[in-house]
Image (cartoon, rainbow, N blue to C red):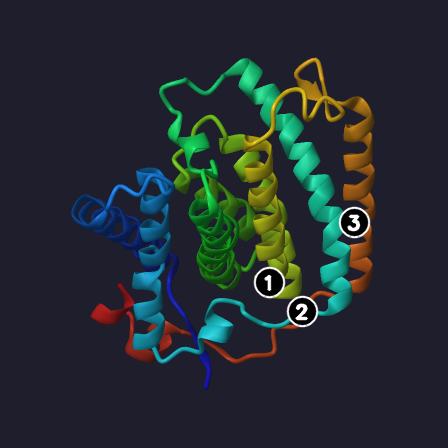
């Protein structure tokens, strides 16, 4: 069965609907059913609910169009070699973006009143540990990858006929949707590399791995004291030695990834939705 590609306007509307639906359900569910568990905080519980309901409009649209979820969300398998090459790439990227974050924080620090960012990462016991691993490190990266790299970027690639623009715009949308002006540059840069990887493999599995790795490292850092990471830091920055290692790992990783990962061929048959329903159809949005 051919894959149906929505218009860019439709994709944007579906994203907005997903954000609004997730926000509304989060407010209702957290307000009604949150039990006040001392280990799982309100921001953490809200993240869980929001991530679950964010993709609902897109999933409903794909089901309505009888589209294959595997193709629609780029769930295509990738080679073991590509996955292995992503390890040094991910470590290097995490180190580099951490230093960029430190520089950004010196220029425009996060206000103390905006403490919910770090609160989401904090583990208070076994329950919250399982919760954070399951939601922050696994669920959130997976949902965001199928939405932004699997769905939205794929639409942009086919509609714009320009991979560079598709990656740039999807990464920008990804950064804006996080609603965090203090991390927007770092999130945007990470989104660029995730978008490139997803395009090259025509799959979200490696971008999901890199996304999960980045979140996992962020959780780890949230539980460290200045003394415990003295080997990593130097005068409020990443140690020059560690930073050099990060740059080398990133360079080696990206070269290795390119060498073992040929650009995935788009062999599936794709149909524009207006070709089926016509330009005046209400279904085209």
Q: Are marks 2 and 3 in contact (CB under 8 Å)?
A: no
Q: Give me the C-alpha separation between circle 2 and circle 3.
A: 16 Å
Q: Are marks 1 and 2 in contact (CB under 8 Å)?
A: yes
Q: Are marks 1 and 3 in contact (CB under 8 Å)?
A: no
SS at mark 3?
Answer: helix
Indicate which disc, 1 or 3, sits on the residue closer to the N terminus: 1
Nearer to us in this view, 87 or 154 = 87
In the displayed structure, does residue 106 sit left or right of residue 40? right
Nearer to us in this view, 97 or 114 = 114
Mark 1 is surrounded, within 10 Å at the Cα level, by few (under 14), some (14 to 19) or many (20 or more) other residues, namely: many
Residue 160's spot in the image, x, y percent? 50, 57
Indicate which disc, 1 or 2, sits on the residue closer to the N terminus: 2
**Mark 2 lies on residue:** 78
Indicate which disc, 2 or 3, sits on the residue closer to the N terminus: 2
Quadrant location, the C terminus: bottom left
Residue 268's spot in the image, x, y percent? 55, 79
Residue 56's spot in the image, x, y percent? 31, 62
SS at mark 1?
Answer: helix
Q: Is residue 79 above or below residue 188?
A: below
**Mark 1 lies on residue:** 205
In the displayed structure, does residue 93 sit left or right of residue 71? right
Residue at (46, 70) in percent of width and height = 72
Residue 36's spot in the image, x, y percent? 26, 41
Q: Give me the C-alpha separation between circle 1 and circle 3.
A: 16 Å
Q: Is residue 107 above or below residue 101?
A: above
Q: Give me the C-alpha separation between circle 1 and circle 2.
A: 7 Å
User: Can residue 164 be seen in this snapshot?
Assistant: no
- Marker disc for residue 253: 3
Mark 3 is surrounded, within 10 Å at the Cα level, by few (under 14), some (14 to 19) or many (20 or more) other residues, namely: many
Q: Is residue 198 above or below residue 59?
A: above
């Amino acid at each position: 069965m051919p894959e149906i590609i929505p218009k860019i306007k439709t994709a944007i509307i579906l994203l907005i609907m997903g954000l609004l639906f997730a926000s509304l359900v989060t407010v209702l569910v957290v307000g009604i059913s949150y039990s006040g568990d001392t280990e799982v905080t309100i921001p953490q519980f809200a993240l869980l609910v929001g991530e679950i309901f964010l993709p609902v409009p897109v999933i409903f649209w794909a089901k309505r169009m009888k589209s294959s979820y595997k193709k629609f969300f780029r769930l295509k398998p990738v080679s073991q070699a590509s996955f292995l090459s992503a390890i040094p790439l991910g470590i290097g990227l995490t180190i580099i973006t951490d230093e960029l974050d430190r520089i950004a924080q010196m220029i425009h620090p996060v206000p103390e009143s905006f403490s919910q960012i770090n609160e989401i990462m904090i583990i208070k016991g076994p329950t919250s540990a399982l919760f954070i691993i399951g939601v922050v490190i696994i669920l959130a990266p997976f949902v965001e990858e199928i939405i932004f790299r699997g769905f939205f970027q794929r639409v942009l690639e086919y509609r714009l006929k320009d991979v560079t623009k598709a990656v740039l715009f999807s990464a920008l949308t990804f950064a804006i949707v996080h609603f965090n002006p203090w991390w927007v540059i770092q999130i945007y840069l990470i989104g660029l590399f995730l978008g490139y990887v997803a395009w090259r493999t025509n799959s979200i599995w490696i971008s999901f791995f890199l996304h999960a790795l980045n979140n996992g490292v962020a959780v780890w850092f949230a539980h460290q004291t200045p003394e415990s990471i003295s080997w990593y830091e130097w005068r409020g920055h990443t140690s020059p030695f560690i930073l050099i290692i990060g740059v080398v790992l990133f360079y080696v990783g990206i070269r290795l990834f390119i060498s073992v990962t040929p650009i995935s061929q788009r062999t599936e048959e794709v149909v524009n939705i207006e070709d089926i329903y016509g330009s005046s159809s209400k279904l085209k949005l």
